[in-house]
């Protein structure tokens, strides 16, 4: 209880401003009645000063914020500037104002100090022990209501008032304020007053810590006033470090050497002596020891919830303590109105953590260990691992890594996971162990050094016999998964399949309860299994595995795996000849990857490959080139050797389709040399197909026969290539016999079925079997029309046109697609632009036939209307046109747009929206394809189609020997 003091009568304080201090006035009280001295450097803040004037003019104003927020400096500057709506009286409260008579006498003294007349007479001197306190306060209140001169009373330190009778009287004054008086209440915490009625009635103006934080302009002026000149980037970084906290900015300005601000800013933190001294005195010192301990222990985690704070600190009342600290403006803030989660000011957290480690290093390690367990139990595995690493507890790191965190490697948190374990990864060479070697493998996978990752994993697996039984299975699962990821990316598909199968076996639905991440392990195992099955040629099995993987990975936010699974499914669709579904899936995958950021884009390489293959099948080599450029860049960024080789094979096919068989041969020879004549089974078949395509285009069908007919049991595509070669060598009967078994094959796929039908039609026509020829052409049109598989029809050459016209006269089916094929065959080779369109410009061009407005195009592509107009202006210039109609016509002549009436049935533009990239060098004109009318003439170059269908010819390693004997 604070002892009351004797106060002179209010008449004692009556004095004209500027006169000498009356006798009997205590010097300490004089200091509290004076507007505080302004700092040596004070920056004007007009936005807040205007707001103070507006709020004070309307009623009571409450300004609350923590230490160093600049609340007192702001109100003092505002008072000195004369912006207040009346004469300003100031009273700085302290512990002595806990007594009612003392408080109200000090209030009256503050008003007398202003020189404002308070009426005649006044209370006489009194002793507070005589029982006259209430009468004394009543008379003071009466004087307040008699005021005629407008006055603004500032009560600084309102958080010092706790006496119920003081608060009750002040409540009454606020509820029925004197007409000529306005109150401004300053404090570190909201007072114990009933302010809700004033707030509800709009009579309470409030300014809190977030309002007082300095913005960039104010911070720049403050720092400049201190002689510190920073560029915009440095200012922004300092604002982020200080959160705009006034004291933090001032301390930084005083700590940083103006001659070398970069070094000073890098060193400025909560550990800086000036900052630490301020926080120790203003934040920690006033708190009781249990609360100080709570702050120190909880500084290891951010943000904080009540349960997390309780777990880390060991104090069950964690939520209440956080609420009290927030209400007391102790540089602790709540991120939402419900007070969860909580966060500490960055400088305060740094100071607390530094002090915790210095004063109680064992306590710091224990707090991290507790945080790791809490985050692990609440499914935040990467954060749990971060704390486990900093706890120094290797067993805890192993538990979190293998049972929780490892699958996050294929999520958006993958880079964070690798950064978290880097200290342990760096120790793998000097201190090899299960944990350090696994961490080294994780870091290697993240930087796409898959060979090194597999080497680390082999050494880690050798330590498994010494691992405790309770963790051994989880460690085995983790090592198998990472090895499957690394193996799959290097082309070792059999090893990838083995690792994935082992994970599925050990982490099945009946896995022991100690593996919370079992479902995530299974999702990634199915993804790896699906990739391996695809490249081994098992399309149906691969599609099923990847479908399940995409669903599960999406559910568990394993974004990289989900994107990759969908991208590989798009490849399967296109290889099967289902171009519409493959293109739709690929575009949605690309858009999903672009939305999720650069880290995900390498895993979309398969989607770009699928788009390129689809465009090749639809005879759009220029568009295919764009997609291949992005596929190659994405595959290289992700260091996926298998996809990179698939892209190179597609590039070879592109060169053949563009008439440059020599370039295709060079690409294929380099690929053979690079792969050591060993590739996964599907790429083996693609390579054989691309070589056959190049040889046929170069006019060497006998080479195709020499390479392929030695196989006693040729596959689907081998039969098709042999059929084209037989036609080119004037053997129509042989060609028909080659492909006849394919009509009964359930695995041939739509693209192969179109090719088989066209070979049958041409062979039957040469053999004068007109009915069979028409039926085969009709079958080819029926199969190709839904997905506009136009490339095989161009492959068949000019002799096909009379057959199509005959089919139209006889049957008349599939007329629109037939007309498109005939138009394409009759069209001259497309000219090339001097300056090619960018991908964005091509995308906008493909919207023009849809008659979409600029606003609609902008909305679809998530860009501004002005950007659409800029793209239109540029593409009009490149096309040498001046209107939308001319752009459409010119685009069709150039082969950039499909002929009229053949728009995309999906209603989608033909190129995916994405970042601009340069179009590759213009491709050569397409060659003139052979005419099979004259089978007695010299053999003509013929191009076979894309490869698809199952491949079963694998060696024990899952690879095929590509060596060609002399």
Image: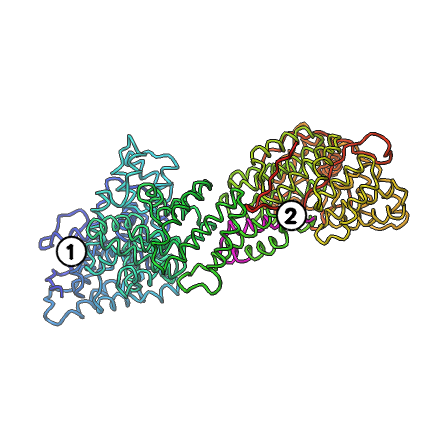
583 or 201, nearer to the observer: 583
Q: Is residue 558 magenta?
A: yes
Secondary structure mostly seen in magenta is: helix
Quadrant of the rendered image containing residue 923: top right
Q: In the image, is 446 to the left or to the right of 77? A: right
Earlier sequence position, callout 2 versus callout 1? 1
| Number of numbered discs overlaid on the protein picture | 2
Q: In the image, is 798 to the left or to the right of 908? A: right
The residue at which mark 2 appears reads as 951
Which element is circle 2 on? loop
Percent x, y of residue 284: 21, 54
Nearer the observer, disc 2 or disc 1?
Answer: 2
Which element is circle 1 on? helix
Residue placed furthest toward the bottom = 131
Percent x, y of residue 637: 51, 39
Residue bounds of the magenta highlight: 551-576
310 or 210, nearer to the observer: 310
Percent x, y of residue 938: 82, 29
Quadrant of the rendered image containing residue 440: top left
Is the residue marked by circle 2 packed among few (<14), some (14-19), or many (20+) residues within 10 Å? many
Q: Quadrant of the N terminus?
A: bottom left
Q: Is residue 193 magenta?
A: no
Is the residue marked by circle 1 packed among few (<14), some (14-19), or many (20+) residues within 10 Å? many
Q: Quadrant of the C terminus?
A: top right
The residue at which mark 1 appears reads as 13
Asked if disc 2 and disc 1 are in contact, CB closer than 8 Å, the reply is no
Q: CA distance from mark 2 to mark 1?
A: 103 Å
Rendered position, 453 above or below 894: below
Q: Is residue 162 visible in the rendered structure shown here?
A: yes
Q: In the image, is 613 to the left or to the right of 501? A: right
Percent x, y of residue 937: 85, 30
């Amino acid at each position: 209880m604070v002892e009351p003091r004797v106060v002179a009568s209010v008449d004692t304080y009556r004095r004209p401003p500027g006169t000498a201090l009356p006798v009997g006035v205590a010097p300490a009280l004089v200091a509290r009645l004076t507007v505080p001295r302004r700092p040596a450097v004070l920056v004007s803040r007009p936005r807040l000063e205007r707001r103070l004037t507006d709020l004070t003019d309307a009623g009571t104003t409450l300004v609350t914020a923590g230490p160093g927020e600049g609340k007192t400096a702001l109100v003092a500057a505002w008072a000195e500037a004369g912006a207040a709506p009346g004469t300003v009286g100031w009273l700085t409260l302290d512990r002595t104002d806990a007594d009612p008579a003392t408080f109200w006498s000090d209030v009256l003294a503050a008003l007398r100090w202003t020189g404002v007349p308070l009426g005649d007479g006044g209370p006489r001197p009194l002793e507070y022990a005589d029982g006259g306190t209430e009468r004394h306060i009543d008379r003071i209140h009466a004087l307040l209501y008699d005021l005629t001169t407008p006055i603004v009373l500032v009560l600084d330190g309102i958080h010092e008032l706790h006496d119920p009778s003081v608060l009750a009287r002040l409540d009454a004054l606020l509820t029925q304020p004197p007409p000529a008086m306005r109150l401004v209440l300053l404090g570190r915490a909201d007072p114990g007053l009933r302010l809700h009625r004033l707030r509800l009635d709009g009579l309470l103006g409030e300014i809190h810590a977030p309002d007082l934080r300095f913005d960039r302009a104010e911070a720049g002026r403050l720092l400049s006033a201190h002689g510190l000149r920073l560029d915009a980037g440095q200012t922004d970084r300092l604002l982020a470090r200080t959160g705009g906290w006034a004291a933090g900015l001032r301390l930084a300005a005083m700590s940083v050497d103006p001659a070398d601000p970069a070094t000073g800013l890098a060193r400025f933190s909560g550990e800086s002596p000036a900052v630490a001294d301020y926080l120790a005195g203003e934040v920690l010192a006033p708190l009781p020891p249990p609360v100080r301990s709570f702050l120190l222990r909880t500084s290891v985690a951010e943000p904080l919830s009540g349960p997390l704070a309780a777990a880390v600190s060991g104090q069950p009342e964690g939520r209440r303590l956080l609420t009290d600290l927030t209400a007391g403006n102790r540089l602790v803030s709540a991120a939402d109105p419900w007070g969860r989660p909580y966060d500490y000011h960055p400088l305060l957290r740094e100071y607390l953590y530094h002090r915790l480690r210095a004063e109680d290093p064992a306590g710091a390690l224990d707090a991290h260990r507790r945080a790791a367990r809490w985050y692990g139990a609440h499914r935040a595995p990467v954060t749990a691992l971060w704390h486990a690493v900093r706890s120094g507890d290797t067993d805890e790191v192993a538990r979190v890594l293998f049972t929780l965190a490892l699958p996050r490697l294929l999520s958006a948190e993958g880079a964070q996971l690798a950064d978290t374990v880097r200290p342990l990864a760096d120790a793998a060479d000097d201190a090899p162990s299960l944990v350090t070697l696994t961490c080294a493998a994780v870091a290697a996978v993240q930087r796409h050094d898959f060979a090194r990752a597999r080497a680390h994993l082999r050494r880690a697996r050798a330590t498994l016999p010494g691992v405790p039984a309770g963790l051994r299975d989880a460690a085995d699962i983790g090592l198998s998964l990472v090895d499957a990821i690394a193996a799959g990316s290097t082309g070792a598909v059999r090893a990838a399949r083995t690792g994935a199968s082992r994970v599925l076996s050990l982490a099945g639905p009946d896995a022991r309860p100690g593996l919370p991440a079992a479902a995530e392990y299974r999702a990634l195992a199915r993804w790896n299994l699906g990739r391996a099955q695809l490249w081994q040629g098992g399309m149906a099995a691969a599609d099923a595995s990847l479908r399940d993987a995409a669903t599960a990975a999406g559910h568990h936010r394993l974004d990289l795996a989900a994107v990759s699974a969908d991208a590989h499914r798009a490849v399967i669709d296109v290889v099967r000849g289902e171009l519409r579904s493959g293109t739709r899936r690929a575009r949605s995958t690309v858009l999903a990857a672009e939305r999720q950021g650069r880290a995900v884009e390498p895993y979309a390489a398969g989607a770009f490959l699928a788009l390129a293959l689809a465009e090749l099948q639809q005879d759009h080599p220029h568009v295919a080139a764009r997609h291949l450029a992005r596929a190659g860049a994405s595959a290289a960024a992700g260091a996926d050797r298998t996809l990179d080789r698939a892209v190179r094979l597609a590039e070879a096919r592109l060169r053949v389709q563009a008439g440059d068989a020599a370039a295709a041969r060079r690409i294929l020879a380099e690929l053979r040399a690079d792969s050591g004549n060993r590739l996964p089974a599907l790429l083996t078949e693609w390579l054989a197909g691309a070589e056959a395509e190049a040889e046929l285009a170069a006019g060497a069908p006998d080479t195709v026969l020499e390479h392929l007919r030695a196989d006693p049991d040729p596959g689907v595509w081998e039969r098709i290539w042999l059929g084209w070669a037989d036609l080119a060598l004037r053997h129509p009967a042989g060609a028909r016999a080659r492909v006849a078994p394919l009509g009964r094959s359930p695995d041939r796929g739509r693209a192969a079925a179109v090719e088989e039908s066209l070979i049958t039609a041409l062979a039957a026509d040469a053999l004068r079997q007109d009915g069979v020829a028409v039926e085969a052409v009709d079958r080819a049109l029926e199969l190709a029309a839904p997905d506009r598989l136009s490339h095989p029809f161009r492959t068949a050459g000019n002799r096909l046109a009379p057959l199509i016209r005959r089919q139209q006269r006889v049957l008349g089916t599939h007329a629109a697609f037939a007309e498109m094929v005939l138009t394409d065959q009759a069209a001259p080779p497309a000219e090339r632009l001097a300056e090619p369109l960018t991908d964005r410009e091509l995308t906008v061009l493909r919207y023009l036939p849809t008659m979409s407005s600029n606003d609609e195009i902008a909305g679809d592509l998530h860009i501004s209307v002005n950007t659409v107009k800029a793209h239109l202006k540029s593409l009009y210039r490149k096309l040498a046109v001046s209107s939308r109609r001319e752009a459409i016509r010119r685009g069709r002549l150039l082969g950039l747009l499909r002929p009229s009436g053949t728009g995309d049935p999906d209603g989608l533009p033909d190129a995916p929206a994405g970042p601009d990239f340069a179009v590759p060098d213009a491709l050569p004109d397409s060659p003139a394809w052979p005419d099979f009318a004259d089978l007695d003439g010299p053999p003509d170059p013929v191009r076979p189609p894309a490869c698809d269908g199952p491949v079963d010819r694998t060696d024990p390693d899952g690879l095929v020997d590509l060596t060609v004997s002399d």
